[in-house]
């Protein structure tokens, strides 16, 4: 896509979160504006995991933060359980913060080094939980136990005494203590070794099943995203390229950018031929002055005049597979279904 | 470039002898708690023009190994023993003033993080020409001409303009291209690439790895590619050494390693990688626990506390490197993967409910597989 449109939104009763025409812009002074996220729409059903994937600078983290209103999007709406979060004042929003929690990329720097683990994990409860300290500790101990950290051992220890993988488990426990409905995971495994990464991914799957969580999983590694997600949205330079059920997306990528990402992922099998031609190019254009029409056209070998003149809209390929491209790799249905 | 063609000529003359022979290399760091055995008896040899992939988790000693070969561990608490024979010269114990003639000229390194490996307050051009002028004795104008040519060869657009840029004016991928150009500037015979693409996006990673392969082929360089990702080295290295706790636990030509892997750690590393060819929500086979404490490593096989196949013997007796069936295949394991004994051991451990075996079989969540006693 780099395109817009809402053809891919579903009309389901169990929708937990819906973002419509979400736009985040950062003014730089003068007339210059960073177009971090430009009019993207998506929805997440209860109990579903949505993967957001793309290169650095594509706006995937900004999207995650915009859901939390940190900062609030410049335009567009974020509806959680039928309530528009962008319309709330800060006091009312504060009451909703317990519903959505976040797990950050760097597990070590996201824990305060001067506070004990018991304290770090209990902090959300100091604000929102029961006032009784013993009751608070009970909840904390239960959560630490659920993520595989021995609560009595960890209670009076500090973050530097734990490995990266253990710190990430502690962050997950902290995100869970308020029993949120939605957790935004912003690259939670990209700072970890493959062996630890597998532990954390398995843990998230278990917790999701146990606590009925809904996840937004942001990552740049396609294999990781596929493993954990029910649906995947591919982003490029602040726009959404393709959105699909994950097995379908990897089997039949329709957007040239999705295909580029898939071809670039290293495959741990020496018998697979490597495309060694690709050596140059591939720089992300500046989000201050994004290309007209389809934002991906400067790197796309299928691009023609239409792509520079007209922005592609989301079009349906089949149920739960939509693409925003004028020349998709898989045929699209010509009739677009507008669910609004 | 003349330096390159000289290197190519020399290479033709002595093709039969390996460029690098490492024998029983050990690097220990003295710390208050004792001695950290970061590299603990590594032996390997690498032929000219070949690529060796070194793979392992963080803390397995792969970075210290490449730094020890180059002689870059100059801290007063670091002790390197053993032998590194590079092109007939012994590097261990060589004084720094002699090493200086090799660093950057004959052997060079590309580091992981292009943000920190370049000097932020010096223009790209000077960082590129500095060592060319020093080692090759070029004039300012010649060096600049070479540098622009190098930038072009690593596919940096508008190289004349980039020559005058500061690192912050370039993207991460461009900066890594500049680091590669710096490493290639004096036509080294041996290139160390230490996680050269870990900080980069997949699309850029693919390009940078292709670029390294292309430059290596053109220049006939020998390369050591250090990474934690078996996917990165799968199609790119001639042979792979898997490191664990400072030792090489398995080494084989790439195709043999993937098709006939014998060490449970190699298998565990491969199994823990999510693959796009698997359906969504495929249970990953995790390696339980974490890498060992290198001051007081476990007795016996260092991997035994995390190994799904481990038996009593593994906890007591350290296996030595044995030869596999395929040519150049060595591994250090009592219960090699693929043998009937290992299958029995696995089944026995599964029956007994060993957490690491259950984790490998994907039967339980990772929530139960952390050995609590390791951090008391």
Image (cartoon, grey):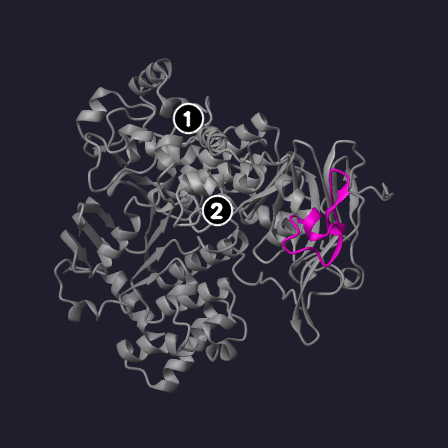
Numbered badge on residue A174? none
Query: Is B308 above or below relative to A32?
Result: above
Is there one chain holding both mark 2 and mark 1?
Answer: no
Q: Residue at label 2?
A: A190
Vertical side of B40 occupied by B92: above or below:
below
Q: Chain of mark 1?
A: B
Residue A181 percent location from the top left of the image: 64, 35
Give the residue number, with chain letter if any, for mark 1.
B368
Image position, residue B185 (x, y; %): 36, 71
Residue A86 as seen in the image, left or right of residue B72: right
Q: Residues within 10 Å of mark 2 (few under 14, many from 20)?
A: some
- The segment highlighted magenta reads A67-92
- Taking depth in this image into account, of A90 and B171 the one nearest to the observer is A90
Please tell me which residue is depicted at 60% across the width and 52% down the height of the picture: A61
Disc 2 to disc 1: CB gap under 8 Å = no
Answer few, some or many: residues within 10 Å of disc 1's Cα (few below 14, many 20 plus, some between 14 and 19): many
Asked if residue A79 lies in the magenta stretch, the reply is yes
The percent coordinates of residue B42 (x first, y second) are 20, 45
- Image quarter in which the C terminus of chain B is found: top left
Q: In which quadrant of the rendered view does residue B256 lie?
A: top left
Look at the image and say whether residue A58 sits in the magenta stretch. Answer: no
In 3D space, how far apart are the residues under numbered discs 2 and 1 (Cα atoms)?
A: 22 Å
Q: Percent x, y for residue A73? A: 70, 56
């Amino acid at each position: 896509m780099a395109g817009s449109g809402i053809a891919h939104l579903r009309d389901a009763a169990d929708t937990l979160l819906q973002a419509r025409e979400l736009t985040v812009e950062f003014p730089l002074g003068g007339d210059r504006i960073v177009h971090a996220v430009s009019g993207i729409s998506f929805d997440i059903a209860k109990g579903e995991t949505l993967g957001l994937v793309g290169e650095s600078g594509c706006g995937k983290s900004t999207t995650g933060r915009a859901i939390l209103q940190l900062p609030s999007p410049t335009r567009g709406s974020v509806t959680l359980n039928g309530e528009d979060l962008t319309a709330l004042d800060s006091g009312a929003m504060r009451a909703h913060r317990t519903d959505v929690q976040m797990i950050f990329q760097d597990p070590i720097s996201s824990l305060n080094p001067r506070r004990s683990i018991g304290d770090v994990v209990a902090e959300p409860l100091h604000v929102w939980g029961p006032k009784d300290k013993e009751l608070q500790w009970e909840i904390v101990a239960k959560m630490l136990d659920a993520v595989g950290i021995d609560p009595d051992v960890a209670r009076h220890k500090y973050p530097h005494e734990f490995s990266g993988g253990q710190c990430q488990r502690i962050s997950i426990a902290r995100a869970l203590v308020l029993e949120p409905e939605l957790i935004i995971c912003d690259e939670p495994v990209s700072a970890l070794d493959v062996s630890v990464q597998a532990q954390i991914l398995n843990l998230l799957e278990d917790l999701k099943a146990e606590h009925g969580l809904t996840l937004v999983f942001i990552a740049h590694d396609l294999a990781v995203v596929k493993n954990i997600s029910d649906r995947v949205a591919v982003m490029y330079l602040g726009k959404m390229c393709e959105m699909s059920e994950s097995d379908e997306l990897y089997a039949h990528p329709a957007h040239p950018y999705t295909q580029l990402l898939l071809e670039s992922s290293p495959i741990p099998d020496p018998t697979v031929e490597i495309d060694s031609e690709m050596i140059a190019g591939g720089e992300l254009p500046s989000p201050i002055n994004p290309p007209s029409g389809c934002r991906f056209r400067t790197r796309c070998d299928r691009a023609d005049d239409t792509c520079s003149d007209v922005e592609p809209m989301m079009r349906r390929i089949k149920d739960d597979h939509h693409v925003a491209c004028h020349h998709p790799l898989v045929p699209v249905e010509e009739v677009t279904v507008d669910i609004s | 470039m003349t330096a390159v063609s000289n290197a190519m000529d020399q290479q033709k003359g002595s093709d039969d002898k390996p460029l690098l022979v490492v024998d029983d290399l050990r690097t220990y760091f003295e710390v208050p708690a004792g001695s950290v055995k970061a590299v603990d008896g590594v032996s390997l040899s690498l032929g000219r023009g070949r690529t060796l992939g070194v793979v392992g988790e963080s803390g397995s000693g792969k970075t210290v190994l490449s730094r020890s070969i180059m002689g870059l561990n100059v801290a007063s608490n670091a002790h390197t023993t053993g032998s590194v024979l590079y092109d007939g010269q012994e590097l261990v114990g060589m004084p720094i003033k002699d090493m200086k003639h090799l660093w950057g000229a004959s052997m060079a390194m590309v580091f992981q993080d292009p943000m920190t490996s370049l000097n932020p307050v010096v223009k790209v051009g000077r960082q590129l020409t500095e060592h060319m002028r020093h080692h090759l004795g070029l004039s300012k104008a010649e060096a600049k001409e070479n540098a622009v040519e190098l930038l072009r060869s690593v596919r940096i657009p508008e190289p004349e303009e980039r020559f005058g840029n500061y690192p912050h004016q370039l993207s991460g991928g461009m900066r890594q291209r500049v680091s590669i150009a710096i490493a290639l500037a004096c036509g080294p015979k041996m290139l160390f690439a230490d996680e050269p693409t870990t900080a980069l996006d997949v699309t850029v990673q693919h390009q940078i790895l292709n670029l390294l392969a292309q430059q290596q082929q053109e220049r006939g360089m020998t390369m050591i590619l250090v990474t934690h990702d078996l996917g990165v080295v799968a199609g790119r290295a001639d042979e792979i050494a898997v490191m664990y706790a400072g030792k090489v636990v398995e080494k084989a030509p790439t195709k043999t390693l993937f098709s006939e892997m014998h060490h449970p750690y190699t298998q565990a590393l491969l199994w823990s990688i999510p693959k796009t060819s698997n359906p969504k929500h495929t249970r990953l086979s995790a390696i339980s626990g974490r890498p060992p404490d290198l001051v007081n490593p476990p007795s016996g096989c260092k991997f035994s506390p995390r190994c799904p196949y481990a038996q009593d013997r593994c906890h007591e007796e350290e296996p030595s490197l044995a030869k596999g069936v395929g040519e150049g295949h060595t591994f250090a394991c009592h219960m090699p993967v693929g043998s009937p004994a290992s299958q029995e051991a696995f089944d026995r451990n599964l029956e007994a409910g060993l957490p690491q075996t259950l984790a490998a079989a994907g039967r339980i969540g990772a929530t139960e597989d952390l050995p609590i006693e390791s951090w008391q």
